[in-house]
């Protein structure tokens, strides 16, 4: 089943097919490591994770490159304020970024490229641009891209830039979305700033040249897919195209994928609005990493997502339903045989699920057949009409679902524990929800011991003690479920 994905460049949904018929070569803009990532950032990284997981489910080989921007204006500004060089400032946020990716179940790309490790490649590209007449040096030693040299500028963002002022320059890495000016490729060294001595002078790269240089280094002059958030379309991606294609005269990427912004409670996320959240903020409030993942991918990537706490509660309930059913599926004792209705439902759910993913990563439509299969299977189990062969068929569908959504297997304890430890180290223990602190005071071993004590109390008919243990666990966010298959527990 071929993947069809909206292509910002063509303005339509196109088939995503490797140019070389062997592997899909894709580049995705990674983080700028000046601070902790917020949920808007992670919506983009999760959408790209859903894409790569879907492609692998469809047995398409991938060569995925992601950059780490570890030198830019914001990093230099923050490092200067902290009184440390950028080489000492950024590692903390690089480590935090990958820890957050792990918490959200995001796979690592095949190649991770750091800007500071690829300076020679950037210098080489700037030299080629100068030779082509597309770059010029100013009196202070900085280098700029000559926008008028690239007549197709604006083809990605569909902006009409015919009236732009020739020679007007902008030297900051990020600027107004309607500002089309010659942009900095290389910034001459300033006192106290991190810089490199190179053939084009002492200085450091502009943000845009970094991605052009690294994408072509690892994927070639022209590759299959370039992805990122919609905020990068202009000017960042537009500038990448101009820089790269001015030298190669080939399409930088044949397919461009852009993930929409998210809103928080119906408003643009900002610190001034009081609705700005990092992943760690949400974990410290007691929300599970799996629920945050599901909430952020619940709406298809090309639609605006309104992120709310009610949405997190709904995601938590959906995951609980899946996990409870999966536990019943795995541990239940079913007779030999099969139910044709369940078999047909499993087959249909699998086909519909893959079709939804292949249709521009429609994650909302992909969820629907899975939950319908869970409903039908639960009913069959209740009626004694679910058999061993049915378990195999349904388990295979759930495995395909979790290969992309990654929420059925419970991996939530570790991210929460690490978030609380981080809060202690950063002096933010007051930000941890009281019930979460209570939960963390109980290890899995301690919970199992209390469950065993409760079972023993019930057997000797000491119901007062059994009820007391249940109450103690409930107060600490531990939910006990008594069933015919035994006692199950989970953290709230």
Image (cartoon, rainbow, N blue to C red):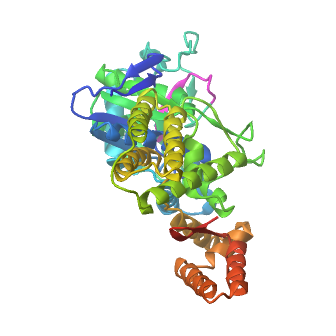
Extreme residue in the top direction = 162
Q: Looking at the image, can residue 137 be seen?
A: no
Residue 447 is inside the magenta segment = no
Extreme residue in the right direction = 273
Above or below, 338 against 460 in this view is above
Q: Residue at x 61, y 26 (%)?
A: 177
Q: Position of residue 185 (x, y in %)?
A: 45, 34
Q: Residue at x 42, y 47 (%)?
A: 398
Above or below, 309 against 427 in this view is above
Q: Residue at x 61, y 62 (%)?
A: 82
Q: Looking at the image, can residue 54 be seen?
A: yes
Which quadrant of the figure has residue 28? top left
In front of the other: 400 or 405: 400
In front of the other: 19 or 197: 19
In front of the other: 160 or 60: 60
Above or below, 62 against 128 in this view is below
Which quadrant of the figure has residue 478? bottom right
Range of residues picked out in magenta:
176-187
Q: Quadrant of the N terminus?
A: top left
In front of the other: 315 or 171: 315
Q: Position of residue 31 (x, y in %)?
A: 50, 47
| Count of marks placed on residues | 0
Q: Position of residue 83 (x, y in %)?
A: 59, 63
Q: Quadrant of the C terminus?
A: bottom right
Q: Would residue 228 appear left or right of 15 to someone viewing this image?
A: right
Residue 186 is inside the magenta segment = yes
Above or below, 456 against 61 in this view is below
Q: Position of residue 39 (x, y in %)?
A: 61, 47
């Amino acid at each position: 089943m071929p993947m069809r994905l909206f292509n910002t460049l063509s303005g339509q949904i196109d088939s995503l097919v490797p140019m070389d018929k062997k592997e899909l070569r894709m580049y995705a803009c990674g983080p700028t490591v000046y601070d902790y990532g917020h949920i808007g950032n992670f919506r983009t990284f999760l959408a790209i994770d859903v894409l790569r997981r879907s492609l692998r489910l469809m047995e398409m080989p991938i060569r995925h490159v992601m950059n780490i921007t570890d030198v830019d204006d914001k990093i230099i500004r923050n490092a200067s304020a902290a009184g440390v060089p950028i080489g000492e400032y950024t590692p903390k946020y690089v480590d935090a970024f990958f820890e957050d990716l792990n918490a959200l179940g995001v796979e690592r790309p095949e190649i991770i490229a750091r800007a500071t490790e690829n300076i020679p490649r950037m210098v080489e590209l700037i030299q080629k641009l100068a030779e082509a007449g597309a770059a010029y040096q100013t009196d202070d030693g900085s280098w700029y891209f000559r926008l008028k040299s690239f007549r197709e500028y604006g083809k990605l963002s569909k902006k009409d830039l015919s009236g732009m002022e020739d020679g007007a320059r902008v030297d900051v890495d990020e600027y107004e979305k309607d500002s089309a000016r010659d942009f900095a490729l290389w910034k001459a060294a300033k006192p106290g700033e991190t810089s490199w001595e190179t053939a084009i002078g002492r200085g450091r790269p502009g943000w845009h040249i970094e991605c052009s240089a690294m994408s072509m280094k690892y994927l070639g002059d022209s590759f299959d897919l370039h992805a990122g958030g919609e905020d990068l379309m202009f000017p960042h991606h537009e500038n990448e195209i101009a820089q790269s294609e001015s030298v190669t005269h080939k399409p930088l990427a044949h397919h461009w994928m852009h993930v929409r912004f998210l809103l928080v409670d119906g408003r643009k996320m900002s610190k001034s609005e009081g609705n700005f959240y990092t992943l760690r903020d949400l974990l410290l409030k007691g929300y599970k990493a799996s629920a945050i993942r599901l909430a952020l991918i619940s709406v298809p990537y090309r639609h605006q997502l309104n992120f709310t706490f009610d949405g997190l509660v709904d995601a938590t309930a959906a995951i609980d339903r899946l996990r409870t059913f999966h536990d019943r599926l795995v541990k239940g004792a079913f007779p030999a045989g099969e139910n044709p209705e369940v078999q047909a439902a499993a087959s249909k759910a699998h086909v519909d699920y893959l079709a939804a993913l292949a249709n521009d990563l429609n994650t909302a439509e992909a969820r629907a057949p899975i939950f319908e299969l869970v409903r039908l299977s639960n009913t069959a189990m209740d009626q004694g009409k679910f058999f061993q062969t049915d378990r195999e068929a349904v388990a295979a569908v759930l495995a395909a679902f979790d290969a992309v959504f990654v929420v059925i297997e419970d991996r939530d304890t570790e991210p929460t524990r690490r978030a609380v430890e981080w809060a202690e180290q950063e002096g933010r223990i007051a930000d941890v929800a009281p019930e979460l602190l209570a939960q963390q005071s109980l290890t899995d071993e301690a919970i199992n011991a209390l469950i065993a004590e409760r079972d023993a109390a019930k057997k000797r008919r000491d119901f007062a003690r059994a009820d007391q243990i249940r109450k103690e666990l409930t107060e600490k966010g531990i939910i006990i479920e008594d069933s015919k298959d035994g006692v199950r527990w989970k953290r709230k």
